[in-house]
Image (cartoon, rainbow, N blue to C red):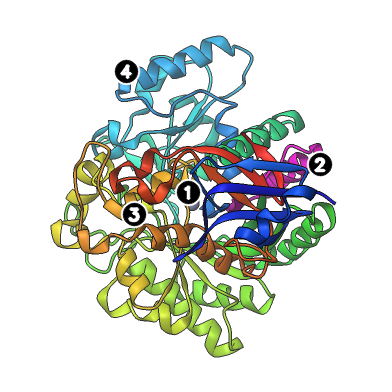
Amino acid sequence: MSTTVWRNGSVWISAGQSTHALAARDGVIVAHGDDALALIDQAHDVIDLDGKTLGPGFGDGHAHPVFGGIETLFAPVRGHDTLEHLLAAVKKWADENPDAEWVRGEGYDPSLAPRGEFDAKWLDDIVPDRPVVLRGMDYHTAWVNTAALERAGITGSTPQPIDGDIAMRPDGTPMGTLREWGAWGMVYDLLPPLSKEQQIIAVQAASAAFASCGVTWAQDAWVSPETLDAWLAGAHAGVLTFRANLAWLAEPEGKWRDAFPTFSEFKACVDREAPELLTGGTIKFFADGVLEGGTAAVLEPYCDCPTSHGIPNWRREELIEAVAECVALGFQPHIHAIGDAGVRNALDAFENAIAIHGTANNPIMAHCQLVDEQDMDRYRELGVIANFEPLWAQLEAEQTVLTIPRLGQERADRQYPIATLLRSGAKVSFGSDWPVTSPVPMQGIGIAVTRTTDHGVGPWVPSECLTLDEALTAYTYGVAVQAGETQAWGDLAIGKRADVVLFDTDIHSVTPFDLRKVGVLGTWLGGKRVFG
Ligand SMILES: [Zn+2]
C-alpha cells in the first residue's frame, strides 16, 4: 500500500468546494482536510503545497496527441512569423536529411499567404528534386511542391474531390494548396509509414507535453490504423503517461460501411492490449471543414465568395445514416462541426439516432464555432456535449486576417457561444485540438475567462466569458462527462482516481489575464508522479 498526502495549500475539489489537504492510497483519493493530515504518519510521500493550488488532472476532450508527437520527427515548420523563415526551416531540414524520400512538416501558419493559398513553386525553389508535403496548423490544409503533385498524379484535369478542394492557378494548373482530406489524402496516402522507433518517440513526446501541463486523460479525435500502432507501441514500451480514448475516423462516400466492422476489431484490440491506459469506444466524423479556409459548411454564403456555402464533407442523409449505425454498434459519435450548417447536420444526425435507438451514446460535437440561434437549445434537449477549444475564442490573425473577412462582422461576433450554451443547460467540455493549438489547459482557461489576446485585444464578446470555476470544470469534470467516466475521475472527491495537478501558484488569487501564465509543478496519474 502506498499513501501520499498533499498538505498546506488550496485543494480545489470541484467548483465551489475546496480544502487544505488531500490523501490518496494506492492511486485512489481517500481523505480530505484534517482527515488527510491524520494519515501523514503512514504516508510514503508528503508533499508540501506551500500555499499553491492542487486540482484534478485535466482532461483534453479533443486532441491529436500522436500527431503532436509526430511533429517532432519532421521539419520544424510551426511558429514562423514570415514565409521566408518558414521556407528557410524547410530547406535546412531537407539539407540535413538528404536520405529522406519525402520532406515532411506539420503545423505551418496558413495566414502567412493571402487567403491561405501557397504556391508549389515557392517550395520548388528550395527543394526541386524530392516531394515536399507540409500540413497547415489547422490540419485541414496541405501545401505541396510540384514533385509531390506529380507523384500523386494531380494535374489540371484531376476532378475536384467531393470532400476536398484542389486550389487552381488562373491558368488552370494546380497551385499546390490542397484543402481537406479528400484533396491532400491523395498525397498523404503515399507517405512511408512510421517505423516502430518513430512511433514510440511520438508517444513519448506527446506524454511529455501533456504531463508538463497537467493533462491526465485525452480524447484522440482521429485514429487511423497507423496511429493505433503508435498508441500500442507507446503503451507497450511504457512511455505513455496519460489515459486516452481513441476515436476511429469514419469517411464518407460509403467508405464507412466497410470500415465500421474493423472499428469493432480495433476496439477489442485496444481492450486486450492496453486496458489500463486506452479505450477505443468512439467514432469520429467531420461534418465540415474550417471557417478560415472557407471549407466550413455555412447556412448563408461566404462574404468573399457569394456562391460558396463551404464543404459539407458528408451528404446530410449519409451522415445521418452513418451516425445511426455508429450508435447501433455501441460506439459514441464525435462529430467535428464548425459552420452553422455543419452544426445543424450534426444535430440532425444525433436527433435521428435518438429517435431510432433511444440514445445517441453520449454524443459529442467538437468545436461548435458558429451555431444558428434556432439550434442553440437543441444541445440541452438532445443531451449533446458541446466541446470547445477555448484558446480559439480570441481575436488573433486567424480571425482578423482569414475568418472575419469571409464571415462578415455579424456572424463573426457569434462565434464560440461558450457561455450561452453552458447557461442554457447544455453539457460543455474543453479541449485543445493540440497540435493545432497549444496543449496547455491553463492557456485555454485564461482565454475562456477573458477572451482577450496576449497583446490585450479584447474582451471579444464579453458576455461569452466564463468564470474561473466554470472554465476549470469544463476542462476537468466536463471532459469526464464526455468520457462517461465521472465515477472514476473529473474532480477530487473521495473514491476517485488520484489524477492530480499541482500549479505554481494559488490560481484563485491570480488576475484573470494572468491565468494563461500559470505553470505546473507536478502531475500525478493514479497517484504516481509523472511530471515534476
Ligand atoms: Zn481536431
Q: Which residue is mark 2?
A: 236
The answer to whether 2 appears left or right of 409 in the picture is right
Residue 149 x, y percent position in the rendering: 47, 32
Circles 1 and 4: CB atoms closer than 8 Å: no
Badge 3 density bin: few <14, some 14–19, many ≥20, Cα 10 Å: many
Q: Nearer the viewer, mark 3 or mark 2?
A: 3
Circles 1 and 2: CB atoms closer than 8 Å: no
Return the disc, 3 or 4, that comes first in the chain's sequence.
4
Q: Residue at x 53, y 64 (%)?
A: 477
- Total of numbered circles in the picture? 4
- 120 or 223, which lies in front? 223
Q: Is residue 529 visible from the viewing direction of this image? A: yes
Q: Quadrant of residue 398?
A: top left
The verdict on residue 517 being magenta is: no
Three-letter amino acid code of the residue under disc 3: Ala
Mark 4: which secondary structure?
helix
Distance from label 3 to label 2 (Cα)? 37 Å
Badge 1 density bin: few <14, some 14–19, many ≥20, Cα 10 Å: many
Query: Residue 448: which numbered mark, if any?
Result: 3
Residue at mark 1: C-beta within 8 A of ligand 1: yes
Q: Which residue is mark 4?
A: 84
Distance from label 1 to label 4 (Cα)? 27 Å
Mark 3: which secondary structure?
helix
Q: Is residue 391 visible from the viewing direction of this image? A: no
- Magenta segment, which residues? 214-242
Mark 1: which secondary structure?
loop
Query: Residue 433: which numbered mark, if any?
Result: 1
Badge 4 density bin: few <14, some 14–19, many ≥20, Cα 10 Å: few
Q: Nearer the viewer, mark 4 or mark 2?
A: 2
Distance from label 3 to label 1 (Cα)? 15 Å
Quadrant of image for the C terminus = top right
Q: Quadrant of residue 28?
A: bottom right
